[in-house]
Amino acid sequence: MANYFRRTPIYLVLMQAFAAPAFAAAVATPDPTPVAAPVADTTTVTIVGEGKTRQVQDITKEDLMKVVPGTSPLKTLDKLPGVAFESADPFGAYEWSTRFSARGFNQNHLGFTLDNVPLGDMSYGNNNGLHISRAISSENIGHVVLSQGAGDVGTASTSNLGGTVQFYSSAPTDEFSLTGAQTFGSDSTSRTFARVDTGLLSTGTKAYLSVTRQRAEKSKGSGSQDQDQFNSKLVQKLGDNNKLSAFFNYSDRKEVDYQDVSLEMVNRLGYNWDNYAPDWQRAVNAAKKIYTGGVNSLDDAYYQGSGLRKDSLIGATLDSNLSDVIALKTTAYHHSDQGQGHWYTPYAPSTNGLPISIRTSEYSISRNGLLSDLTWELGQHTINAGFWAERSLHTLSRNYYDATGGQDTNYFLSNPTSVVFKQNFTTDTTQFYAQDTMSLMDNKLKLNYGFKSPTVKINSVSVVGSRAAGDLKASKTFLPQVGLNYALTKNDELFASVTQNMRAFQPGVDGPFSQTQTAFNLGQANLKPETSTTLDTGYRFKRNDFVGSVAVYYTKFNDRLLSVATCAGIVGCPSTLVNVGSVENKGIETALSYTVAKDVTWFNSFTYNDSKYKSNYVDGTTTVNIAGKQVVDAPKVMFKTELSYDTPVWFARTGAKYTDKRFYTYTNDASVPSYWIVDLSTGYKQKSLAGLKDVSIQLNVQNLMNKQYYSTIGSNGFQASDPTGTAQTLLTGSPRQFFISFSGKM
């Protein structure tokens, strides 16, 4: 056991931590100046990315506190230009429905990290990460940084053809405190959060522990979406120039699914249509093709579907100031995941004679990784260089279990009656990078240039079934990034950047290995990883009463891979993977925050995004004409307006978001209409009340106007065409809901 521990990345960081103080003492000059300060846990961060060479914007702790506790921070980012967020639940945490995109890049083409630890692409059937809602409780997030067009070359991601989202956890406080919060709301929602901070101890240690319990019923149909979380973080000073930070987070999430619908189904069965549960007999009758109440097919509803995930995430980071000009930051991490997706299927009977069985998709992940970054201040130059290495072991299987009636089976099942397929994947990732930032003309001009060299190797072993086995490699020796920032005045600046990126192939439920072995063998020789080139340029400004930015961008994709659904997605037919050549994105983003009065702020953001396929593709022997068509799930126009009132005692915020129509077929013959959504929050706060500190009472109203609209599209994948509106790949948005929250500390 000891020898195994010595081989883990966590062990290497701890050994570096104990060695660092002695090394630093030997090389440090008197009164050393740290050169790589960690991101501050602050509530005031410039919203337009001042001084950056790329379009970068932030969400602060204050923004995160004004939404319903438990809300995904991705949903909070929806106010920023270029961002589209959709979910069928009010919290944005129901992972089957969650969709996040920036500038037409969906989340599968973006990169996500938490305290520098990679989260993968946060897709539902993830093979190399986990969703932010499971990685950490929203109350413990201190800061979120969004780069709409391209992330930094040092970001630990091989999916970010487009931008990146970096989450940072809050730091333990210097004073001892107990924090508690309670939320009640619509659909029997109850969320309890409790946290204890040790304060700064004499040993230079501070830490926190927190627990979260959330229970909520679905807004339609039957079933709940529940989650329990444990978070912990420790910060340890090591001498005067070094700091060790470590965290351990655990999540246990169970969510009952909403039924995926089509345009035709909503017209026939109603906006609030859902699955049959708890009516077991109706589900049995439907499986026997005895339909009632307007139902006319097996796929109109099922008894129930659900998703289960258990995750453990641990990370340790050592910040070492080796001298007054050299800093080293090293992060090691481990992530383990167990997951099951349940579907009561009428297509396969149980062995006990019931016409329904339970089909599962079962996942496991075990990954270990190490990141290291060296920063060297050399006159006018700031040089960064580093690497990222990860090994991920992922298992995917599809199994069947006997149904025994309408009993609760929302737990991890074992001992299947049959196994359809099982695949084991080993993914090795390495990425090296280097960059230099030059400051010229008395720091008015900043030039940034660098590159990264990612390599991802995947080995797939087919244990059971006919899904593909084999090896794939995606690698680029030189992916450059060049940027500049020029300060016209102290209040005005120009920025521009050009970046090349690559998205590696994906193992797991989607991607090349989800095909049959025959299809994989035929296409492997011509398979190329997706690449992109992004040009990002803009202007930032600030005055006494307002601050804002304007950005113009252009992106060209090469070798864009599309997964074309060949049947109802829940049935699980192998998808067709096609290369549609190039895709072009171009658009403009604006953001303006205006201080109307002392306590009143008006924020607006506008996005125009034109994303189009530039090539047709061939499906079998048929040419599918999509050249010049709009990219699916990429609204052309979005507009967000938000009015905020904030005093030391009272606060209120109301916002409205317009989202343009979105296509869900590649040929653009089917779409969902545009819509407006209005949200409201208001509350009362006191620094001290009845022996408590930072007391707050807050009311949130989601979807204030009770708008009926389609939230998620492509929930079961995208199809070439849907002329009759029967593709079951849509989810409706949640109705108006009310939440009241109480919080305080002592």
Image (tube, rainbow, N blue to C red):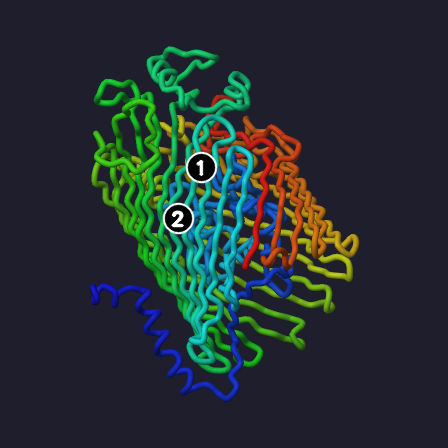
Mark 2 vs mark 1: which is more N-terminal?
A: 1
Residue 353 as seen in the image, left or right of residue 342: left
Task: Look at mark 2 in the image and give the residue it sits on.
Answer: 251
Q: Amino acid at mark 2?
A: Ser
Frontmost residue, 124 versus 424: 124
Number of numbered callouts drawn:
2
How many neighbours does mark 2 have within 10 angstroms: few (below 14), some (14-19), or many (20 or more)? many
The residue depicted at 44 percent of the width and 47 percent of the height is: 122
The residue most toward the right is 597
Q: Amino acid at mark 1?
A: Gln
Which quadrant would residue 235 be assigned to in this image?
Answer: bottom left
- Can you give x and y, in whole percent of width and height, for residue 546 in the image? 75, 57
The residue depicted at 56 percent of the width and 81 percent of the height is: 379
Where disc 2 sits, the SS reads: strand
Residue 304 as seen in the image, left or right of residue 470: right
Q: Is residue 65 above or below residue 521?
A: below
Q: Which mark is residue 208?
A: none
Q: Which mark is residue 225?
A: 1
**How far apart are the alpha carbons under marks 2 and 1?**
13 Å
- Can you give x and y, in whole percent of width and height, for residue 78 in the image? 59, 45
Res. 50 visible in picture: yes
Give the position of the C terminus as an image quadrant.
Answer: bottom right
- Can you give x and y, in whole percent of width and height, for residue 319 in the image? 44, 72
